[in-house]
Amino acid sequence: MAALPNHNRAMFWRIVRRLLFAHRARLFVILLALGAGAAVTGALLNLQADAKRRLTSEFRRFGPNVLVLPMASAAENPAMLPESILRSIPLENANSKVEAASSLYTVVRISSAPSKSPVTAVLVGKTPFAFVRALDGARAAPRDVAPDSRDEYPCVVGERLRQRLQAREGTQLRLSAGESAGSCWVAGFQQRGGPEDDRIAMDLRAAQNLAGLPGLISAVELTVPGTPKQIEEYAAYLQRILPQAEVRPLRQFTEAQGKIYSRIAGLLDFTVALVLLLTSLCVMAAMANVAAERRNDVGLMKAIGGAKRRVLRLFLAEAALLGAAGGVIGAAAGIALSMYLGKAVFGLAARPRLIVYPESVALTMMVAILSAFPLRRLANVRPASVFRGES
């Protein structure tokens, strides 16, 4: 008696194999529809998963999204922070590195020649990391001088300030702040269409020496990765551990990032749903033809004792196998397609996400099983009507 269930199981899968390969042309059409749907679904889901990473990297170009500023009520140096505050800032959030840069802002008088009247502008002192970023997009300097190797320092001049000073690359500028004075040479220019075009930037140590403020900074600029909620939580935690400072998240950046990602995710979700719906309609039309062709076979099965439940199980197993085959092939092609689209649209191939592959296969199997609804009508076929030739 123990061999009977195994015999039934072997017979079950033998019938399923015969059902699958009885009409190979129709099988190919169903597999093509399911594979195409899985490919588009996998591509869109992978692009959606990669969009968060791409948006985060793109928004970093706009600058910091969290600022650490001095408290307005501070009694000593109300507009300054100790540079040592950097050691208290955690440099990791959402399993990604937080970029931190110290800044010092002071007003200086600049002259490009002794005979010309000085121009008042804002001097921005940056840490070496931020200074390199400031040079991004500027023309390369004709000479390379380390900031601490001589009394003259390299500096980057905003485009509008350059026009006021009539300066060129390599021009020596005289700077004075109060009783302190110094000089720098123009290493390059920057044009960003904002207040940076009216400023002059140089190394933080040089700016501190010129302003007579060693060890003090005006702000800490943080580029914090993560979702808007994660950034808000990081800023709240930072405020708790830095009561002597004011932590101010730039919500216009974090909220804009969240809104853009929500809209992109919503559009991709709608497209995925539409693709799955169209795929199910195509498969359902093919299954309707299959149901018409198999009416006599089902009548014979039921006439020799096949239960309604077992007949339904046969067709559901067939649909699930077709969905799994189409999903496995199509999802792999879809992930490869998303990498190509990411390279073509963003200039950087989308990173394949492992979670996308089983999701695409599962969705394709679900579509195949739901699209097999026309086959459910075969379970209600009466053997007597089939043998009498009734439609």
Image (spheres, grey):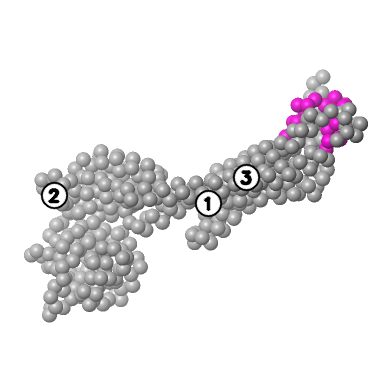
Mark pair 3, 1: CA separation: 17 Å
Which quadrant, please, contains the C terminus? Answer: top right
Name the amino acid, label 3: Leu
Secondary element at image label 1: helix
* One can see residue 278 in this view: yes
Residue drawn at (24%, 73%), measured in percent from left and top?
162
- Is residue 316 highlighted in magenta? yes
The disc at residue 47 is 1
The residue to which callout 2 is attached is 78
Left or right: where does residue 80 sit relative to residue 232?
left
288 sits to left or right of 339: right
Residue 239 located left or right of residue 368: left
Q: Give the range drawn in magenta.
A: 294-317
Q: In this view, does 332 lie above or below 312?
A: below
Asked if residue 343 lies left or right of residue 153, the reply is right
Q: Residue at x 35, y 44 (%)?
A: 231
Residue 197 falls in image quadrant: bottom left
